[in-house]
Amino acid sequence: MATRRDAATNLGALIRARQAAPPPRAAPPRIDTAQTMNNDALILQDPTQGGAKAAQLILLLHGVGSNAQSMTDLGRAYARVFPSAMVVALNAPEPFMPGSPVQFAGRQWFSIHEVTEDNRPARVAAALPQLEALVRDWQQRSGVDAGGTALVGFSQGAIMALAAAMQPEPVTARTIAIAGRFATLPEAAPHENCTIHLLHGKTDAVMPYRHAIEGALRLKEFGADFTADVLPFVGHELHPDLVELAVEKLEKHIPARLWLKPGEGNDVGEDDPTR
């Protein structure tokens, strides 16, 4: 029987496969997350606690109305594959729906109260400096620079991750947006050292998958290093298939900057009559 992954609608016409089989990896040490939770973040793996140096920094950004703990399964999946990485789920700085008569335990990166297509970009831009400051703080704690940092966001967290990726000097080299979108479609290419992965469920009724397609088409126009995958029968959720794919992108995708010569890759998505 075909699985969701077997039937995945991958925008392969837009993307040249850049994958290589990774070496076997050791299992990470067991971490008691209850001892590593604070108001700002949930540390799911910290190799520096044992005196080791972190090789990567993987920061997870939750969706609106949720919190860092909602990213636990995804973070543990990354920890299994990257035992030398510091893996941290961040809490958004704002309480969800402040001033509401109903008390919410969740957080938000920016307010969705009366949010529209017109005012969303300004709200994202206003929230971005605080996120970038959080990223730089964790980079300092971990000893990992932007080149070894990955931002992985879900829903509103994905919106923020994509906004960070499109800055002239991004704080991260790898961005994975799950069930998210660009607040506004890019008007210029992302930084040459930035790789973007767009992952979406085709039955997502909260953030329709057309946003992933529109974003992919715009990134293709600029010759950006990106991948885009749409999985059928998956809604607005951190579905196990999306979690698996998100981990696979960091594990197997080789960024174009590491192996393409200047000028190569301009034909990504074009048919080659010699093949």
Image (cartoon, grey):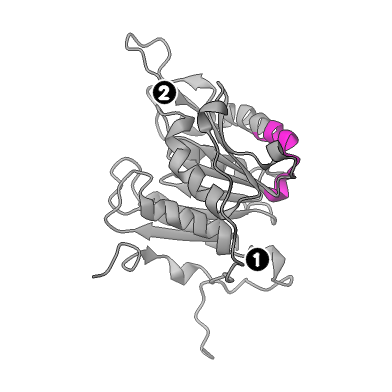
Drawn side of residue 179 relative to residue 166, left or right:
left
Identify the residue at image location x=49%, y=49%. 77
Type of amino acid under label 2: Gly
Give the class, few, some or many, for how many residues have Cα within 10 Å of label 1's Cα (few <14, many ≥20).
some
Give the class, few, some or many, for how many residues have Cα within 10 Å of label 2's Cα (few <14, many ≥20).
some
Q: Which mark is residue 256?
A: 1
Identity of the residue furthest to the left in this view: 1
Do residues under tags 2 and 1 come within 8 Å of each other at their CB atoms?
no
Please state the extent of the stretch shown in magenta in the rendering: 135-148
Q: In the rendered image, which quarter is residue 180 located in?
A: top left
Q: Secondary structure at mark 2?
A: loop
Find out whether residue 23 is within the magenta segment: no
Type of amino acid under label 1: Ala
Q: Secondary structure at mark 1?
A: helix
Relative image position of residue 87 (x, y in whole percent): 59, 41
Q: Which residue in the structure is indicated by mark 2? A: 106
Relative image position of residue 193 (x, y in whole percent): 69, 55
